[in-house]
Image: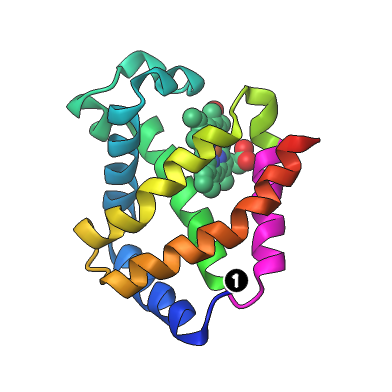
């Protein structure tokens, strides 16, 4: 399948908007994720006690975590010309997450939110959101592979 040059450019150009205010976007996506999946806060010992709610946004450990994930996603965005390499990086994350009891379904839930989130919050247009869906569909198999082991 793969990404066309235009799809890659759409994702990378839009990511510049994310980069311009990364902490804010990162916090917002995770607020959305944890609001939809409140039980998942228990996986994060550094801020689980803060609880899901508006107070989380100002929690430093939460902010540090969301920024870590977004910086990582930025590395994936920069590597979209080489889906094998990007997939390998995600596979490595799966390997570090699996012992924490985090499943493929949770990775999928978070990544599923991303295209629409970028459309609603970061000015991504429809083709950009669709390009993300294609990119994620291409990258999922690398992650599933790690969970299968
Ligand atoms: C696309 C999805 C995700 C990406 C790119 C991602 C990325 C990362 C990165 C880069 C780290 C730090 C390095 C490492 O330990 O590997 C990390 C740590 C962590 N992630 Fe994720 N993550 C994702 C999804 C999730 C989900 C869905 C959960 C839980 C529901 C989760 C829970 C954690 C936890 C508990 C840590 C360790 C935090 C700590 O105590 O320092 N991650 N993640």
Residue under the image location 29 percent in, 59 percent down: 118
Up the image or down, 13 lies above or below 134; here it is below
Q: Residue at x 50, y 57 (%)?
A: 73
* Residue pictured at 52% horizontal, 82% vertical: 4
Magenta segment: 80-95
* Left or right of 120, for residue 62: right
Measured as percent of width and height from the top left, residue 143 is found at 66, 47
Rendering colour mode: rainbow
Q: Main secondary structure of the magenta part?
A: helix
State the image quarter where residue 65 is shown: top left
Quadrant position of the N terminus in the picture: bottom right
Spot the residue most to the top. Answer: 49
- For this orientation, the residue located farthest to the front is 1
Residue 76: tell me if it is visible: yes
Residue at mark 1? 79
The picture places residue 87, in percent across and down from the top left corner, at 67, 59
User: For mark 1, does the 10 Å Cα neighbourhood hold few (<14), some (14 to 19), or many (20 or more) residues?
Assistant: some
Residue 67, can we see it? no
Classify 69 as above or below 42.
below
Relative to 24, residue 51 above or below:
above
Q: Residue furthest bottom?
A: 5
In the displayed structure image, the side of residue 20 where residue 81 appears, left or right: right
Task: Specify whether 134 is left or right of 118.
Answer: right
Q: Is residue 70 magenta?
A: no
Report the number of numbered marks.
Answer: 1
């Amino acid at each position: 399948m793969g990404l066309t040059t235009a799809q890659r450019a759409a994702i990378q150009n839009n990511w510049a908007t994310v980069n311009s205010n990364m902490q804010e976007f990162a916090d917002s996506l995770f607020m959305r994720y944890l609001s939809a999946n409140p039980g998942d806060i228990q996986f994060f010992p550094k801020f689980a006690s803060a609880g899901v709610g508006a107070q989380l946004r100002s929690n430093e450990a939460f902010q540090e975590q969301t920024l870590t994930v977004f910086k990582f996603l930025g590395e994936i965005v920069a590597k979209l010309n080489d889906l094998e390499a990007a997939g390998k990086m995600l596979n490595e994350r799966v390997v570090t997450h699996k012992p924490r009891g985090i499943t493929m379904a949770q990775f999928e839930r978070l990544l599923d939110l991303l295209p629409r989130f970028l459309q609603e919050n970061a000015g991504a247009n429809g083709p950009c959101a669709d390009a993300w869906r294609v990119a994620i569909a291409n990258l999922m198999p690398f992650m599933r592979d790690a969970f299968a082991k």
